[in-house]
Image (cartoon, rainbow, N blue to C red):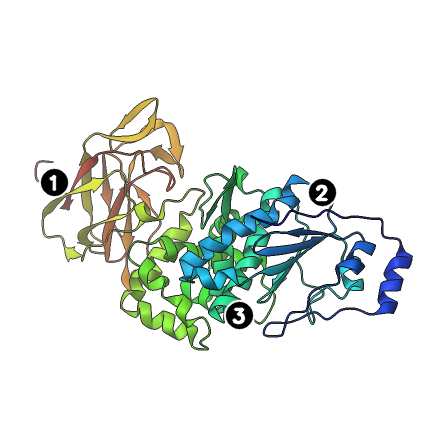
Amino acid sequence: MYDQYSYRSCTCPASILWLLFYLGCGPITLVGEEFVEPDRRRAELVGIRELNSQYLRLYTDLPKSPTVDELPIVFDKAVPLWAEYFGISDNRIQKWKMHAYVIRDRAKFSALGWLPQGRPDFVNGFANTQQLWMVEQPSDYYMRHLLLHEGTHGFMHAMLGGVGAGWYMEGMAELFGTHHWQEGNLHLRWFPEVRQQVPMWGRVKLIQEACYAEKALGLQAVLSIDKRRTFSTEEYAWCWALCKFLDAHPRWQKRFRQLPSHVADREFNDFFRESFQKDWLELRLEWQAYIRSLDYGYDIPRMVIRHRAGKPLEKTATIKIAADQGWQSTGWLLRGGKEYQIAATGQYTIAYDTKPWLCEPGGVTLQYHAGQPLGKLVGAWRGEGGKFSHPVPIGLQAVLKPEHDGVLYLRVNDSPARLSDNRGQLTARIALGRFPDD
């Protein structure tokens, strides 16, 4: 049974703040230092109240509200989920508790000496093994998000002894911060289905804008993000995107989830590269495909690229393409500068809205995605060095003339968030030059 929350408040005239400065400030600890309990009596003088639960003692100058007052409950729900993911025993988490400072007026916390040493001007949040600080946020969702983000830092510091390289440190905090909270149930590592579910979060939008402006970060650029400085909002987005991608990817999830045992190692990134060395080219390719089609509700397992070794096409060939999957390799190596004719047939379900939407490779013009009819057959080339071309429309038939050698990949045109209700497959056939009967 959790302790009952206490609610204390009072006005805070400037004279009281000066009195607290005069009386002196209590110590604030950094990572690795012994924690000293705050002086609650002095907190009351400046209108700071206390909320207490099993794993969190929270101090705030924010007035009583459902959003603020349920923060300790949210935190308590998160702790067993962190423990399960990172392999921490129940016995260890029962002995752990964080102190949180949720701030509207920094002057009050500064007067008490309750801002982190060396980081009193932190922008939004800061954490160590036993304490976290966060400023008031503009949405209910983001208040919880930031608490879970900083709580993840604290949990990793306390239970794992480190947080890894910069991309992993902030990527994991963003991964666990992105959540769904409804009727007392907490879901972490969640992929939001629509932006309205996560007001003020904006990670997907930032990546979409960067890709549109041709400023997307490659895999190596994300891995090189330095944790010795303050991150930009865009860098938080890229770190989240990479951790979410690897954590949900069927082929790479197991290797990714071995990283927590290396978070205290200085050579963390070296271990990561060694772990993925044999798949490095594939990882770079899939990363590019992922970020260029990223959207809310992105279904990572279904959007995993299905690879096949490419062989030069001699005459004609035929292949089946599933409607409920992302890019699928045909195994056809097309030569640069040569013409190929491709045609597609078949009927499949592209959506379900009270009844199935039947579709053929030409797509349905009642709805569009990425500028093309929903369900239309599209293609792309995987060229030298693993580079993936921009998609090209194919439909019922098309003539392809790639500029460079590349393996042809096909898929039906649909949102990465809406593949699960697709059913069936189409048949694609290709010929070097033209089909013999044309």
Q: For the view shown, which residue lies furthest in the top direction? A: 354
Kind of element beneath mark 3: loop
Distance in Å between CA atoms under marks 3 and 2? 38 Å
The mark closer to the camera, 3 or 1, is 3
Instruction: Evaluate if marks 3 and 2 touch, with contact meaning CB atoms under 8 Å apart.
Output: no
Residue at mark 1: 435
Name the quarter where the C terminus is drawn. Answer: top left
Q: Nearer the viewer, residue 171 or 280?
A: 171
**Which element is circle 1 on?**
loop
Residue tagged 3: 226
In the picture, measured across the screen, residue 65 lies left or right of residue 359, that is: right
Instruction: From the image, state whether disc 3 or disc 2 is nearer to you.
Output: 2
Q: Is residue 418 above or below residue 234?
A: above
Q: Decide if residue 182 is on the left or right side of residue 112.
A: left
Q: Residue at point 58% right, 49% down?
A: 2
Q: Position of residue 320 (x, y in %)?
A: 17, 41
In the displayed structure image, the side of residue 425 where residue 191 appears, left or right: right
Numbered disc 2: secondary structure? loop
Q: Earlier in the sequence, mark 3 or mark 2?
A: 2
Three-letter amino acid code at the position of disc 3 = Asp
The amino acid pointed to by label 2 is Lys
- Where is 210 relative to 141, above or below? below
Residue bearing mark 2? 64
- Residue 10 located left or right of residue 260: right
Callout 1 environment at 10 Å: few (<14), some (14 to 19), or many (20+)?
Answer: some
First in sequence: mark 3 vs mark 1? 3
Q: Label 1, label 2: how many angstroms apart (C-alpha)?
A: 73 Å
For the point 76% across and 66% down, which residue is it? 113
The x and y percentages for residue 394 are 27, 39
Name the residue at 41% across, 57% down.
Answer: 85
Residue 370 location, x and y as percent?
Answer: 40, 39
| Vertical relation: 170 (above or below) 380 | below
